[in-house]
Image (cartoon, rainbow, N blue to C red):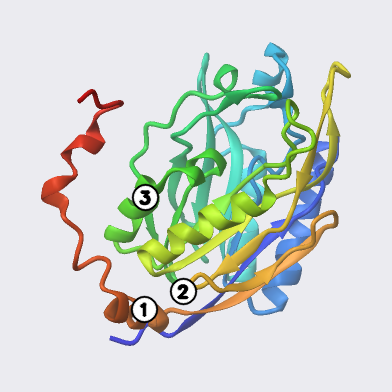
Amino acid sequence: MNKGKVTIGMTQFACDPDRNENIKKAEEQIRKMAAMGAKIICTQELFSGQYFAQIIDYTKYDWAEPVDGPANQRMQALAAELDVVVVSCYYEYAMDGVYFNSAAVFDADGTLLGNYRKHHIPEGPQYIEKYYFTPGDSPYLVFKSKYGKFGVLICWDEWFPEPTRILALKGADFIFYPSAIGSEPDNPELDTSQTWMDAIRGHGIHNNFYVCACNRVGKEDAADGSGFMEFYGRSFVSDPWGNVLCEGKRKEADLIVAELDLDEIKRARDILQFHRDRRVDSYQELLKLHIHE
């Protein structure tokens, strides 16, 4: 069965301290990419604000919004106006004391298709996310939109092969990985940008489908002046063979737009046959946190 082609887009910009300015930037980029032919557009992780998880500050809980909050209402209206699917990444208020790092997906008529909550929550120098985010309780979702079937995994999720495999088995043709990733504060000489790209490209190769990673750019100081993060951009799309179709700039805002030939997925899978040769009967040990022989 022929699936045809779909053009996707992803935002990449530096986040301003003014949250309304960031929503405006996202809207401007979405409008430009829609004009370029993009039909499914993903925002970067937590696009409406600077990365607040560099320090512990309980007042940032007030930044969280319900799924029908102001930022998502703007993205929902934009999806309906432009006839595009929008993945809107935001800080979700579920109830007092329970907050998630989430992505709401709006179909091209503005309908809410679903809400994915980030499962894997990191903790490290200036990535103090466990303080702010409850581990996600949503399943790994495949969104069946007007223009295609896809999954969403958020930032730290992208370093683990299991979620991507699950989404591939559920029928996703491509995955968005909205991210806020950059310098390693405790190892400032270490540049992980290529490692990040290679890990995600590997997921695409193992599952023979498209992977689409978007990131922010720019330097953001911690609110208490104790340090900073410098985000390395390089948003990219790679095909079922691992070839990079497009890559964003490292230090500047950019528009990431790529045409995906969905029929290439079947071709790659028919040739490589990774799915045929899986031994699901021998993987039980993966369900253990660690293994003692």
SS at circle 3: loop
When asked about the image quadrant of residue 18, the answer is top right
Residue tagged 3:
141
Pick the front one: 67 or 179? 179
Residue tagged 2:
241
**Counting other residues with Cα less than 10 Å from the Cα at mark 2, is it few (<14), some (14-19), or many (20 or more)?**
many
Of the residues under marks 2 and 3, which one precedes in the sequence? 3
User: Would residue 67 be visible to someone looking at this image?
Assistant: no
Disc number lying in front (2 or 3): 2
For marks 2 and 3, give the CA distance. Answer: 24 Å
Q: Amino acid at mark 3?
A: Leu
Q: Amino acid at mark 2?
A: Trp
Farthest-out residue, front: 293
Residue tagged 1:
268
Relative to 180, is 103 on the left or the right? left
User: Would residue 27 be visible to someone looking at this image?
Assistant: yes
Q: Vertically, is 141 above or below 248?
A: above
| Residue 255 place in picture, x, y as percent | 75, 66
When asked about the image quadrant of residue 46, the answer is top right
Of the residues under marks 2 and 1, which one precedes in the sequence? 2
Relative to 85, is 4 on the left or the right? left
**Residue at left 68%, top 22%?**
125
Q: Are marks 1 and 3 in contact (CB under 8 Å)?
A: no
Q: Are marks 2 and 1 in contact (CB under 8 Å)?
A: yes
**Residue at left 56%, top 43%?**
155
| Residue 245 place in picture, x, y as percent | 61, 75
